[in-house]
Structures are given as C-alpha cells and as structure tokens.
Image: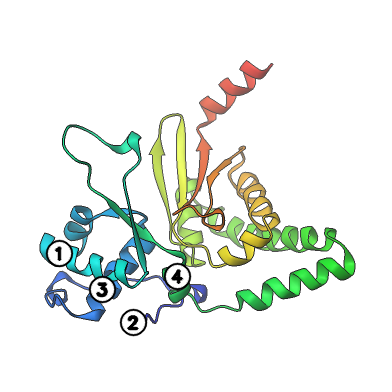
Amino acid sequence: MVISVELRHNTVVKLTSPMTLSKVDDPRTRDLVARSILENGPSSAATLAARLGLTPAGIRRHLDLLVSEGVLEAREPRASLVRGRGRPSKVFLMSDTGREKFEHSYDDLAVSALKFMSAQLGEQIVQSFANSRAEEIERKAAKALAKKAKKSAALADFLTEQGYAASIQTRPLGEELCQHHCPIAHVASEFPQLCEAETEALSRLLGTHVQRLATIAHGDGVCTTFIPTPQSSSANRKVRV
C-alpha cells in the first residue's frame, strides 16, 4: 500500500466526506482510516466507524487489512479506560512501520550526522543542537501564542501546523497535550536530548512546569505532556515547602 502523506511538510489532513467512504475494498478508505488513527491517537473500531461514517463490518475489514500489512497494531485498552461489564473493545494504534509510511524524511542521515558530530566534537554538541532546535520552535510558537487567551489550545494548533497532529485533553488537575505524530521520532529515539529540550521549551511557552508522560520515540502510541492548572501547581509548591 502506498500512503502519500507528508506531515513533515506541515500538511494538515482533512477527512473526506462519509459519502466517499462507501467502497469497502477501496485502498483510499484504508488510507483515511490510518490517517484518522495517526491524527487522533489509539481508537476502537466503534469510534472509527462513527468518526468516518463507516459500518462496523466495513471498518473491521479495513482494520484487519491494516493490521495484516503491519500499518496498525491492535492492543487491549488500558485498565483505567475500561468501564462497565463485558469484554473491552480493542484499540488500534499506528505501528512504527505505519509511521514510516506516513512520513518522508532523512532520519537515517540525521542520525548518522549527529553520531558523527558527537564522536568528533563530543556529546555536548548534540545537546547544543537540541537546545537550538527547541529555541527555534519556541520563537515560532511564541508568536502564535502571543494574542491567544488559551495558551495550551493555541500551542496545540501551532504544533499541528508543524506536523505533530496535536490536541488538548482535559484531565483532573490539568490538561494533557497529546502529539499523535512526531516528525523526528526515529532520531529522538537515538538522541533523547531532543525530547528533553522540546519539553523545556513547552514549559517556557506555557509559563509552568510540564511533565512528559509518554513519547513516541520511546515506543508509546502518543507523545503525552501533562500541563497542571495554576491552582494545582501552587498547591504542589506549597506541599514541597
């Protein structure tokens, strides 16, 4: 299957109308199913069917094919998400192979270049590069957040424009910034300094300490960053004092 999406080039995918999703064997529909999971994170068959306007039987056929092709993985949902009785529905998430099909990059070259730089000039050069990249993201994002009252939502919009397919989820004591795609996941798995510097930049942009809970680079389905509310942040500081 050929998937022709290049999120690295800041493409924001718009789903086609349900009227065009009627062909069960249409590879373009499978492409949309995969894109939906890439953009929205792990999803059940029922959620995908409702989101894309497909029948349950139709969506399961596409999911089975995508799993057999190695584009998706099927997993049991987290225990905290299971409600009520009955067997919980499996969730489907993008595999590493699927992510590679959705991005066009020079990851191998970037890894080789950073390894060479580190060997020749020392590991500090990698940290300097990570800091420089994070500062560039921060400069660009600061302009997007400057006139927005809701900083976290504005940051998610900015990151989506940059190819991260980001969203904000409300949680007790704060919010979670979810990045469903990472254009540098392969490189960051070799050089975690990139993730660490990026997290520090997010903290500065939002004016509060944030915590990375999961990263695609470490094998998680989504990069998840917890953003505490001002009240919970103050309470935590008082407890520590």
Distance between mark 2 and mark 4 Cα atoms: 12 Å
Mark with earlier residue (4, 1): 1
Image location (x, y in percent) of residue 106: 61, 79
Distance between mark 4 and mark 1 Cα atoms: 26 Å
Circle 1 residue: 53
Number of marks:
4
Circle 4 residue: 97
Q: Residue at x 64, y 57 (%)?
A: 138
> Is there CB contact under 8 Å for labels 4 and 1?
no
Mark with earlier residue (2, 1): 2
Q: Residue at x 32, y 68 (%)?
A: 34
Three-letter amino acid code at the position of disc 3: Arg
> Which quadrant, please, contains the C terminus?
top right
Image location (x, y in percent) of residue 223: 50, 52
Of circles 2 and 3, which is in front?
A: 2
Q: Nearer the viewer, residue 140 or 45?
A: 45
Q: Nearer the viewer, residue 51 or 233?
A: 51
Circle 3 residue: 30
> Is there CB contact under 8 Å for labels 2 and 3?
yes
Q: Residue at x 54, y 67 (%)?
A: 183
Q: Is residue 208 above or below residue 99?
A: above
Visible residue check, residue 206: yes
Crowd rating for badge 1 (residues with CA inside 10 Å; few <14, some 14–19, many 20+)? some
Mark with earlier residue (2, 3): 2
Helix, strand or loop status at disc 4: helix
List the single residue furthest toward the front. Answer: 68
Crowd rating for badge 4 (residues with CA inside 10 Å; few <14, some 14–19, many 20+)? few
Picture disc at residue 1: 2
Distance between mark 3 and mark 1 Cα atoms: 13 Å
Distance between mark 2 and mark 1 Cα atoms: 22 Å
